[in-house]
Image (cartoon, coloured by chain):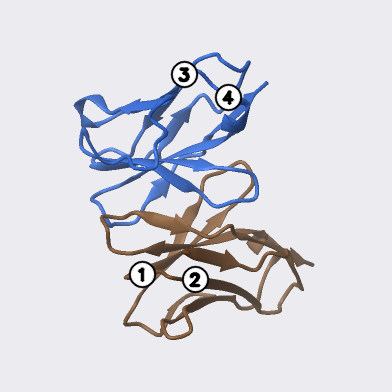
Amino acid sequence: EAGVVQSPRYKIIEKKQPVAFWCNPISGHNTLYWYLQNLGQGPELLIRYENEEAVDDSQLPKDRFSAERLKGVDSTLKIQPAELGDSAVYLCASSPQAGETQYFGPGTRLLVL
Amino acid sequence: SQKIEQNSEALNIQEGKTATLTCNYTNYSPAYLQWYRQDPGRGPVFLLLIRENEKEKRKERLKVTFDTTLKQSLFHITASQPADSATYLCALDQGQGGKLIFGQGTELSVKP
């Protein structure tokens, strides 16, 4: 069974540019999570989806970050405009239902110059 | 304030020894505590979950304890191997629909 797929794996952009990350969760998983992981730190939740509904986006900086999960499957996380401090790894995870084991993708490593 | 702390220093041990990693928390009331392994360039991988009413959980060479009075979990790897070298993350789940709060992780290095 395929795991959580993320793309791109790496992205280098200049500040003020937009960037988007894509996530394909494990088939049948209703819950999808986006996390931010800074170097030497644990992941921090940005947003959680139940099917296509964002049920917890309290940690998402809404002035520049947006996310969507159309049709309750794939999801996209966007940053516009990117800032130097956004350089980090963006992880996507999914679980069959909320509260069940989370399966993480490999992450997208973003470098903002 | 709420805080989760893991051993800040990297842990270096000899192959065959038992590795013990610590996770302390303050001002949380977790329903569950989970441990993950993360290798460089990869996402975390779930290892074990322990509930607030459980004292100990085992899986093969792994053992987790959970003391809600001390607000501490210990993660043990017995008969450690170089392949166990990785960063280990603890995560609290307060039973709010799977919202995990992670510690900063402890890097374990097992030398042959």
The residue shown at (34%, 27%) is A67
Marks 3 and 2 sit apart, C-alpha to C-alpha, by: 35 Å
* Callout 3 amino acid: Gln
Marks 4 and 1 sit apart, C-alpha to C-alpha, by: 34 Å
Q: Colour of chain B?
A: brown
Q: Colour of chain A?
A: blue
Q: Left or right: where does residue B110 sit relative to residue B46? A: right
What chain letter is assigned to the residue under label 3? Answer: A
The residue shown at (22%, 31%) is A72
In the rendered structure, find residue B25 and report the number of the disc placed on it: 2
Q: Secondary structure at mark 4?
A: loop
Query: Disc 3 designates what residue?
Result: A80
Query: Disc 1 designates what residue?
Result: B30
Query: Disc 4 designates what residue?
Result: A83
Near-viewer residue (A82 or B89):
A82
Share a chain, discs 3 and 1?
no
User: How dense is the environment of label 4, judged by Cα within 10 Å: few (below 14), some, or many (20 and up)?
Assistant: some
Q: Left or right: where does residue B38 sit relative to residue B28? A: right
Q: Secondary structure at mark 2?
A: strand
User: In the picture shown, does residue B99 fall above or below B110?
Assistant: above
Marks 2 and 1 sit apart, C-alpha to C-alpha, by: 9 Å
Q: Would residue A76 be seen by someone viewing this image from the given angle?
A: no
Marks 4 and 3 sit apart, C-alpha to C-alpha, by: 9 Å
Q: Are marks 4 and 1 in contact (CB under 8 Å)?
A: no
* Callout 1 amino acid: Pro
Residue A93: percent from left, percent from top: 39, 43
Q: Are marks 4 and 3 in contact (CB under 8 Å)?
A: no
* Callout 2 amino acid: Tyr
Instruction: Identify the image quadrant of residue B74.
Output: bottom right
Residue A28: percent from left, percent from top: 23, 40
User: How dense is the environment of label 3, judged by Cα within 10 Å: few (below 14), some, or many (20 and up)?
Assistant: some
Q: Are marks 2 and 1 in contact (CB under 8 Å)?
A: yes
